[in-house]
Every structure is written in structure tokens, then in C-alpha cells.
Image (cartoon, grey):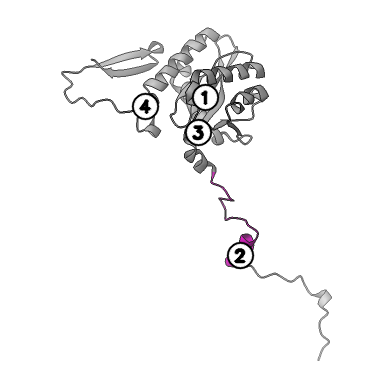
Amino acid sequence: MGAPADPRRAGPTRTPPSAASAVWKILHAAGIDPAPRRAGPAWREFLTNQAQGIIAVDFLHIDTVLGRRLYAPAFLEHGTRRLHIAGITAHPTREWAGQQARNLTTDLCTRMEPLRFLLRDRDGKYGQPFDAVFEAEEMEILKSAPRAPRTNAHGERVIGSIRREALDHVLIMNEAHAWHVLAAYERHYNEHRPRRARGQLPPGADQQPITVHDLEVRRLLRTRILGGAINEYRYAT
């Protein structure tokens, strides 16, 4: 009979895989909840549950026909989908951004009361003066992750709508012209453009217009916005 094998020369022992129940017990004992919750709702669930208290902001840039770049902060209320273009400038300093934040809170007035969160990216154009305006309203600043545009998906989407429906069809000359175009689109977006998330209602409407069955009595009127780039349709009174 040969000598027993030296255990020091044996290969590495393999640990048998742990059962799922054993892993659950270990995590549960450590106070770690199962993924993806990790002691809190997912980001999409948070945005849905807190929609009435969130306002998002993102900077929209516009290139003029003379090669000058302009910037405009676009605010969007998650609950009502109401759009606010706060201002436009070629030099978006932190002090200027803070002033636009003060102008917005003044315009919203009592409508600021249900808002609890400001969602923005980490752009250096915001800064402490900008955040301080909303913190004074007892709002919490939520910063999106770097290079994660889907974190502020509503803000990114409204900027895409502005480009596709207005800016891609108009040659912008200067700041005054850009402000005229953005103000016209803001009125269209808030007062006429339907929103799927609100049951095909514009942000400023509370109920659907009356359905007309006799088209010979009621005629449709078309209103051209921005020289025909956008058309609005209403029933003639």
C-alpha cells in the first residue's frame, strides 16, 4: 500500500456554490434588500410618484445664421408638462442663471408651493446662486448622473420637440429673434399642443373640447404660427 498523498501538493479545493436561499439569508441578515430596490424605489418609479413636485431644467443652445451660439434654460413641470423658457443670452454666467431662476419663481408665484424637487444636470452654468433660489423655496436639488441624459428624460424630450417643431424650420438671426420664436412656441406648447401623458390635453387645459358632429355648422379655423412652421386648428365660434 502506498503512502498517503501529501495534502500540501493537492490542487486548490473548490467551494460548492451557495444556494439562493443561503444568499438571501446572508443579505437579509445584513439588512440589504433585494435588487433593484436597495431600500428605495427605482428612478422611474420615483419620477412617476413625485411628478407633481418635480420641475426639471436643461439648457437649450441655438446657433444663429451668423455663427453665434445662444443659450436658453428650459424648465418643464413634470406634473402638468408646462414649459417655461426663462431667458436667452450668449453669455450664460452663473449670476445670469441665478437671475433667471429668480424670475421664474416670481412668475410661478403660488404655483411653486407643490414643487419639492428641481432636477438638473451637472452643467457648470448653474452654480450656487442658481441652486440657492430653489433651496430658499424649500426645494431639494437633484443632480443627474454624468453622461446620463435619460435621467432627465422629460427635459431632453421637450428640447428635442422645440428643435424638431420650431428651430429646425426657422433661421435665427439674433437674440431678439430667438426670443420671439421661443416665446411663440412656449405659448403653442402650453395652450394648444396635446400631451399624451395628459390624455391628449394641452398643459393649460382641464378638459377635452366639445366634439362636433355636424361639420356644416361648425367650421375649422387654422392659425399659422411662426410663418406656417406650426399650425393650430380650432372650431369657429
* Secondary structure under the numbered disc 4 in the rendered image: loop
Residue that badge 3 annotates? 53
Q: Amino acid at mark 2?
A: Lys
The answer to which of marks 2 and 4 sits earlier in the sequence is 2
Residue that badge 1 annotates? 75
* Secondary structure under the numbered disc 1 in the rendered image: strand
Marks 3 and 4, Cα distance to the nearest angstrom?
A: 21 Å
Percent position (x, y) of residue 196? 38, 32
Percent position (x, y) of residue 67? 59, 11
Marks 3 and 1, Cα distance to the nearest angstrom?
A: 13 Å
Span colored in magenta: 19-42
Q: Which mark is residue 164?
A: none
Circle 1 or circle 4, nearest the eye: 1
Percent position (x, y) of residue 193? 38, 23
Q: Amino acid at mark 1?
A: Phe
Within 10 Å of disc 2 (Cα), the crowding (few <14, some 14-19, many 20+) is few
Residue that badge 2 annotates? 25
Q: Amino acid at mark 4?
A: Pro
Residue that badge 4 annotates? 194
* Secondary structure under the numbered disc 3 in the rendered image: helix
- For residue 30: magenta? yes
Within 10 Å of disc 3 (Cα), the crowding (few <14, some 14-19, many 20+) is some
